[in-house]
Amino acid sequence: MKSLLDKIARQALFRMDSERAHNLAIMALKSGMPLARPPQISKRLKTIVGGMVFPNPLGMAAGFDKNAEAADGLLRLGFGFVECGTVTPKPQAGNPKPRLFRLEEDAALINRLGFNNDGLVAVRERIKERAGRGGIVGVNIGANRDSEDRIADYETGVRAFGDIASYLTVNISSPNTAGLRALQDRENLSELLARVLATRDEVAKRRRSPVPLFLKIAPDLTEEAMSDIADEVLDKRIDGLIVSNTTLSRTGATSRLAHEKGGLSGQPLFERSTIVLARMRLLVGPAMPLIGVGGVDSAETALEKIRAGADLVQMYSGMIFGGTCLPGKILEEMSAYAQRENLASLRQIRDTRVDEWAARPLN
């Protein structure tokens, strides 16, 4: 059940403009105030991915803490990891407001923020400031909208964070920067991955081992595009895939705001993103780590992502509607499930429904 504080906070925040409410939530998390009791998490949830030991598989997705201001507050809620960003080389204001919309009837969000962030210099300083505090904090990197060489922007991001981030995510799948998704096309993707991996290896001299590098893809890909991406990530031997970003589809959305332009996240994205996740698992095989994102708002949706092929899962919109107690609730229910099923690790259920999910039609 939601705490009284969560219920009061939701009522107050939902009366506000969505972006203002989001900024207040970041401030509250930065303040260090106890927003939820620490969850009791079983050691059965421990997950090892890319050489990193995650205390549990539930993470906060990129887009919530764009500027690495609230990572410690999010970790205190129970998250096993936090992904900050998207961060671009130069600061940018993003798209005109309003640009963030709550679809309350659908437990969904539409955003067309456009990589608004403080830029890599400011974000790097914040990541450096929390050094020694522990916790897995990744950085999601992107390209400035006016960049003449977007791949060079990703190289710049790797140089900026490759020695201090727990991992890096190359985000080429946001629908809110014109032309960005074209980097998912095979020829562009091949060049992008070759260049960022070469840069990652240069930066590796400043740390014990190369920073794990993930690629975040869209849920709106054709079968051919999925196959091409799988071939390229296997060929280049990147460390994993994040499936998926927000969608341009409006399937399942009934709100009067569903017509707004931008990427849709939340409950209506769950089925589409899980189908793409399962299909990518079949394409890349059992060894490559996958992070499942899209519509995670309960222990059951998190577990279903794992059954469909995910090693880790992330949420964002779920916490907007479920409150700060939700991550802990999900983790305690996942712990109880693992105990009840006598699982030493949730890895034991991974892929158990991958064929079923992969066979479903994408509407």
Image: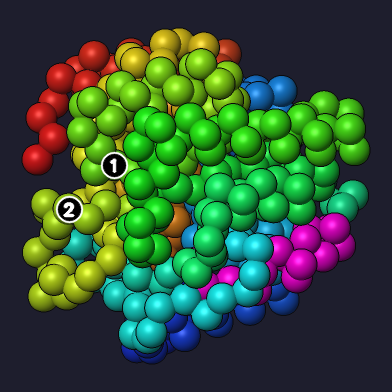
Going from N to C along the chain, the mark reached first, 2 or 1, is 1
Residue 167 quadrant: top right
- Whether residue 358 is visible to the viewer of this picture, yes or no, is yes
The local secondary structure at tag 1 comes to loop
* SS majority, magenta: helix
| Place of residue 208 in the rendered image (x, y in percent of width and height, measured from the top left) | 88, 29
Give the labeled residue for mark 1. 219
Quarter of the image for residue 69 reads bottom right
Q: Secondary structure at mark 2?
A: loop
- Of the residues shown, which amino acid type is indicated by label 1? Pro
Q: Decide: few, some or many residues near mark 1? Use Cα within 10 Å; few <14, some 14-19, many ≥20.
A: many
Residue at mark 2: 249
Q: From this viewpoint, which residue is outermost toward the front?
A: 148
Magenta residues (range)? 115-130
Q: Is residue 360 left or right of residue 246?
A: left
Q: Is residue 117 magenta?
A: yes
Quarter of the picture holding the N terminus: bottom left
